[in-house]
């Protein structure tokens, strides 16, 4: 993944969503602030974007299919000022795409005007939805985020804190939320802390974002992590925080560190940039070959490749370049077309790779199709040997918490071992980073991090 928000190829798992929020006692140019915060988090979702802001005594929204930059003329015009706003970038992981599922979701209900922006997936959404259906609830979208609004509306409690406690009890899975509820901003992170969420006070306003890069986009603010299970309510009378009942364990998503988050972000208390370099160094320490050159798959493997090269004392080179105008890969019907799409995007540099024994580093292996094409590109350009190294373990299980990972049947590591993958891709060897090595590099013990897509140990029941 790269900061501009396009994957290297269709090999990588899909992105999901990012959220942003602003609150001030006085009116601000909230639309432009949300624009910059969402633009900085575009890598978390490119399918749709949207903002909601307080207008007089109600809430208005502006949602669009496509990238944040397409809304520059409107959101940067400075015509709207408000004391509160939230925003969202979306990648459809659950509930399908389309403008109907773009966020923030806005409702007017017995509890007031409420807009919600959600990052993550609720793992017991089917059961919760069934209960709501049977009591007569009507859904406008197929996204599981709407379930949360129904539960808020249906709560018989009074007062925002009591309603939130009630509405979120029994909700399992991943939810980092920014909610505008009338004239107050509410920021919530689920008790297991799957998805990151940060908050900062800066220049007389409060800001929240999925990633620290979303906050730093506005200026050099000091931030803190919203704790797992923490709910923060910010209004004209100040800020107050309370905690949902704590979970038996935490389940920070390890994918955030090695793949999803932007390298300049600090996630779960560590630098994403340094975490990825540490993984690359660990691959080098565990490797059994001495290549002439270390080459990243741009951009998803760049930092791990750098870490490998530094650890092994072997030259690092951009033996593959990426066409930044190629955009996202499309789902193409034939192998030939898929190969041409990758060839549009990635190019081997003959003068760098010819005659060399190369280690090529990427973050993960999903279906294996793109890796085979990359190996071909390097060998056509004259590479003598191509050894594929992954900075994560074998991906074997789907994710129910907001990451778009294909089915078990599609994941190549469920069909082939490393030798089989090497044969299929044409690589001279393939090695994954063992899970225990990854956990140790990232200081990610089992009771703090989710690694279910690698080990199948899901931290919640799935329904
Ligand atoms: Fe992250 Fe994998 Fe857990 Fe999903 S299953 S939350 S991608 S670690």
Image (cartoon, grey):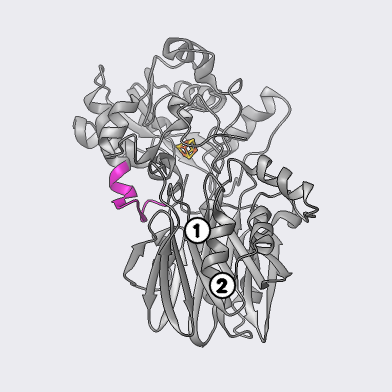
Q: Nearer the viewer, residue 237 or 16?
A: 237
Q: Secondary structure at mark 2?
A: loop
Residue annotated with mark 2: 159
Q: Does mark 1 have its CB less than 8 Å from ligand 1?
A: no
Which mark sits nearer the N-terminus, 2 or 1? 1
Can you give x and y, in whole percent of width and height, for residue 156 in the image?
65, 64
**Residue furthest bottom in the image:** 26
Q: Residues within 10 Å of mark 1 (few under 14, many from 20)?
A: many
The picture quadrant where one finds residue 184 is bottom right
Query: In the visual, does 165 lie left or right of 302?
Result: right
Q: Nearer the viewer, residue 347 or 68?
A: 68
Residue annotated with mark 1: 41
Q: Nearer the viewer, mark 2 or mark 1?
A: 2
Q: Residue at x 58, y 65 (%)?
A: 163
Q: Residue at x 48, y 15 (%)?
A: 421
Mark drawn on residue 9: none
The picture quadrant where one finds residue 110 is bottom right
Q: What range of the chain is rendered magenta?
A: 262-275
Does residue 299 show up? no
Q: Nearer the viewer, residue 457 or 165?
A: 165
Instruction: Please say if 5 is above or below 68.
Output: above
Q: Is residue 266 magenta?
A: yes
């Amino acid at each position: 993944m790269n900061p501009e928000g396009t994957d290297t190829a269709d090999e990588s798992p899909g992105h999901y969503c990012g959220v942003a929020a602003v609150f001030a006692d006085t009116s601000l140019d909230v639309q432009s602030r949300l624009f910059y915060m969402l633009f900085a988090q575009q890598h978390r979702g490119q399918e749709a974007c949207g903002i909601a802001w307080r207008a007089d005594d109600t809430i208005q929204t502006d949602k669009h299919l496509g990238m944040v930059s397409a809304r520059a003329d409107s959101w940067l015009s400075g015509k709207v000022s408000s004391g509160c706003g939230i925003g969202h970038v979306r990648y459809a992981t659950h509930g399908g795409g389309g403008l109907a599922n773009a966020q923030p979701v806005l409702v007017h209900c017995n509890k007031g005007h409420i807009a919600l922006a959600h990052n993550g997936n609720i793992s017991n959404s089917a059961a919760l939805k069934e209960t709501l259906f049977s009591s007569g609830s009507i859904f406008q979208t197929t996204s599981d985020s709407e379930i949360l609004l129904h539960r808020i509306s249906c709560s018989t409690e009074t007062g925002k804190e009591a309603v939130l406690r009630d509405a979120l009890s029994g909700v399992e899975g991943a939810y980092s939320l920014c909610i505008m509820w009338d004239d107050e901003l509410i920021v919530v992170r689920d008790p297991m802390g799957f998805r990151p969420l940060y908050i900062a006070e800066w220049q007389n306003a409060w800001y929240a974002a999925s990633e620290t890069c979303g906050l730093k986009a506005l200026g050099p603010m000091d931030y803190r992590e919203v704790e797992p299970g923490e709910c923060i309510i910010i209004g004209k009378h100040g800020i107050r925080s309370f905690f949902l009942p704590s979970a038996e364990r935490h389940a920070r998503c390890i994918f955030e560190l090695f793949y999803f988050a932007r390298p300049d972000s600090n996630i779960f208390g560590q630098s994403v940039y340094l975490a990825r370099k540490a993984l690359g160094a660990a691959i080098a320490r565990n490797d059994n070959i001495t290549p002439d050159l270390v080459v990243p798959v741009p951009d998803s493997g760049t930092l791990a490749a750098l870490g490998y090269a530094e650890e092994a004392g072997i030259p690092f080179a951009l033996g593959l370049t990426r066409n930044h105008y190629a955009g996202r890969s499309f789902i193409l019907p034939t192998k030939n077309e898929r190969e041409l799409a990758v060839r549009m995007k990635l190019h081997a540099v003959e003068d760098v790779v010819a005659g060399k024994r190369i280690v090529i580093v990427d973050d993960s292996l999903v279906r294996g199709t793109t890796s085979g094409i990359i190996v071909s590109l390097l060998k056509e350009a004259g590479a003598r040997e191509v050894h594929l190294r992954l900075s994560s373990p074998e991906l074997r299980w789907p994710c129910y918490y907001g990451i778009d990972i294909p089915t078990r049947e599609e994941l190549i590591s469920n069909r082939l071992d490393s030798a089989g993958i090497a044969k299929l891709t044409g690589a001279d060897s393939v090695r994954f980073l063992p899970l225990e090595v990854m956990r140790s590099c990232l200081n990610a013990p089992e009771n703090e991090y989710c690694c279910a897509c690698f080990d199948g140990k899901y931290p919640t029941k799935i329904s």
